[in-house]
């Protein structure tokens, strides 16, 4: 079991200098034996945005105009730059790096940073990452450090000694770099040897901050692309495992291990994710959610079984999975439950367990519950929400003992228009109405319950009546004892001839 707490931090930075061009070469969309570059339009001119390894070796640099680049390298092959595709590939690589740690950050479009604190020998992990990236046809350089800035600088410049790094590693503007170099300060070590006060006075506090982070004197962290799990358990195999039965057995072991940690913390899981890392860097992720905190291994295992059975694309082990990780992405307090005299658990809720299983099999969007909405318009007072979301009690109008309910349980959607043929007074309830070609004579009525339009939520509505018409609701009963919920849409001061509607049937 691994937790996020640590004392000494170690970061691994990966720099992929030719990611953009090698992506196209790897996919067969660009030649591998000719100088290659990507271009973009900048200031009404086509300029080199990314340079391939061969073109860089021949002296081509980014920012050069396409005309000058062709003059330097007549055989240069170019294509349009596509940053989104680069970021997508980098995200896929970040998913594959989750096998080492859940703390992975993407650096713009050409690098990754991994927080390897507590994750094992960093040198061995770095060597394994480079081997896997090389098999993908990509070039990568690595660097280790106690801060992300130190690790990335070592990766970009290929220099282990921080003091020997050039001042450009500080990430300061070009004008400040030139000023430092003119003053004879060409390396980070030379800058670090100067009085900090004088440097801050000349170049600002930002230079000192970058210097302290680069040298490791100031603590610095990464911002992972995903929220780190509260609890995670990992199983690594010496050899890739290709039998699905063995994979599921290992997953159940991780579930038991995770539930033990949840019990120790007095919590239950609300959201879990199992991630399976294949030896060819393919990653499969299985997520389950629960409607209440759960730490019963059998119940959680059953949810994952439902999730796997519902997959349209079955798990394909390929050459085998070599790492499995189970993350608890959300957890809540869960008190210990004790069985009653007949051995049943008081906290067990079969209905909730059924909802969890159905939501896992059919996806959460297809299993809904009704929840209260922040409105007093009857047909908008409830929302269909995923059943596995946190449950909140609905505040339905309560009727006094012995009285009928104030509102029907079922509403017509939309309300059906009726024709009122008689009324005692214009502003009062109807005495008779026609609905679905049948007449109904009213003998009793209750109301009105007046509901104004939500003019404050409508664009341009600043005064009552500007955002819609007022409704007057009545509960009425006909000569045969049938009860209806009717409303007049609009006051006579708002509309010359208000319409009547039936919104529901009362018991």
Image (spheres, rainbow, N blue to C red):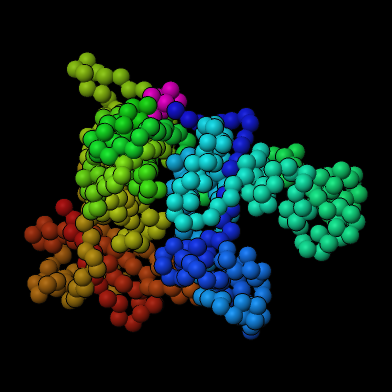
| Residue 47: quadrant of the picture | bottom right
In the image, farthest residue toward the top: 341
Residue name at image x 22 percent, y 22 percent: 344
Magenta region: 258-265
Q: Residue at x 25, y 72 (%)?
A: 500
Q: Position of residue 363 (x, y in %)?
A: 28, 51
Does residue 49 sit above or below 202 in this rendering?
A: below
Magenta-colored stretch includes residue 193: no
Q: Is residue 484 above or below residue 265?
A: below
The residue at 37%/33% (across/down) is: 237
Please, what is the dominant secondary structure of the magenta stretch? helix
Q: Which quadrant holds the N terminus?
A: top left
Q: Position of residue 170 (x, y in %)?
A: 75, 52
For this view, does 374 lie left or right of residue 200? left
Q: Residue at x 26, y 33 (%)?
A: 246
Is residue 75 positioned above or below 386 on the image? below
Residue 115 shows in the view: yes
Left or right: 416 with respect to 81?
left
């Amino acid at each position: 079991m691994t937790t996020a707490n640590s004392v000494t931090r170690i970061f691994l930075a990966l720099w992929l200098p030719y990611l953009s061009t090698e992506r196209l070469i790897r996919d067969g969309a660009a030649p591998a034996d000719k100088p290659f570059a990507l271009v973009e339009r900048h200031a009404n001119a086509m300029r080199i945005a990314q340079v391939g390894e061969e073109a860089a070796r021949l002296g081509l640099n980014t920012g050069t105009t396409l005309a000058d680049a062709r003059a330097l390298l007549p055989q240069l092959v170019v294509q349009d730059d596509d940053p989104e595709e680069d970021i997508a590939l980098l995200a896929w690589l970040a998913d594959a790096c989750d096998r080492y740690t859940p703390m992975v950050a993407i650096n713009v479009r050409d690098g990754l940073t991994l927080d390897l604190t507590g994750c094992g020998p960093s040198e061995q992990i770095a060597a394994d990452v480079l081997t896997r990236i090389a098999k993908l046809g990509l070039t990568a350089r690595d660097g280790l450090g106690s801060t992300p800035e130190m690790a990335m600088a070592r990766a970009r410049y290929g220099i282990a000694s921080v003091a020997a790094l050039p001042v450009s590693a500080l990430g300061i503007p070009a004008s400040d770099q030139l000023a430092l170099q003119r003053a004879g300060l060409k390396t980070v070590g030379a800058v670090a040897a100067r009085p900090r006060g004088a440097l801050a006075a000349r170049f600002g506090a930002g230079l000192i901050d970058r210097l302290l982070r680069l040298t490791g004197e100031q603590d610095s962290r990464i911002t992972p692309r995903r929220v780190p799990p509260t609890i995670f358990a990992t199983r690594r195999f010496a050899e890739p495992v290709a039998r699905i039965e063995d994979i599921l057995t290992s997953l159940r072991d991780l579930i038991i291990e995770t539930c033990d940690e949840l019990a120790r913390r007095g919590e239950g899981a609300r959201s879990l994710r199992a991630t399976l890392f294949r030896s060819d860097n393919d990653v499969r992720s299985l997520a389950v959610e629960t409607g209440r905190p759960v730490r019963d291994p059998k119940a959680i295992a059953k949810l994952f079984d439902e999730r796997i059975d519902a997959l349209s694309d079955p798990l394909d082990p390929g050459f085998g999975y070599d790492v499995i990780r189970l993350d608890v992405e959300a957890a809540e307090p869960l008190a210990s439950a004790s069985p009653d005299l007949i051995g049943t658990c008081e906290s067990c809720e079969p209905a909730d367990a059924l909802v969890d299983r159905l939501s896992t099999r059919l996806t959460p969007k297809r299993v809904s519950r009704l929840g209260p909405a922040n409105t007093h318009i009857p047909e908008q007072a409830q929302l269909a929400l995923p059943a596995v979301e946190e449950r909140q009690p609905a505040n339905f109008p309560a009727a006094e003992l012995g009285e009928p309910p104030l509102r029907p349980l079922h509403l017509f959607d939309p309300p059906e228009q009726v024709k009122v043929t008689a009324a005692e007074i214009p502003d009062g309830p109807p005495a008779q109405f026609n609905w679905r070609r049948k007449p109904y004579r009213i003998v009793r009525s209750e109301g009105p319950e007046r509901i104004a339009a939500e003019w404050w939520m409508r664009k341009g509505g600043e005064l009552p009546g500007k955002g819609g018409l007022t409704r007057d609701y009545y509960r009425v009963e006909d000569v045969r004892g049938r009860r209806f919920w009717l409303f007049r849409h609009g006051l006579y001061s708002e509309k010359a001839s208000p319409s009547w509607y039936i919104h529901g049937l009362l018991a």
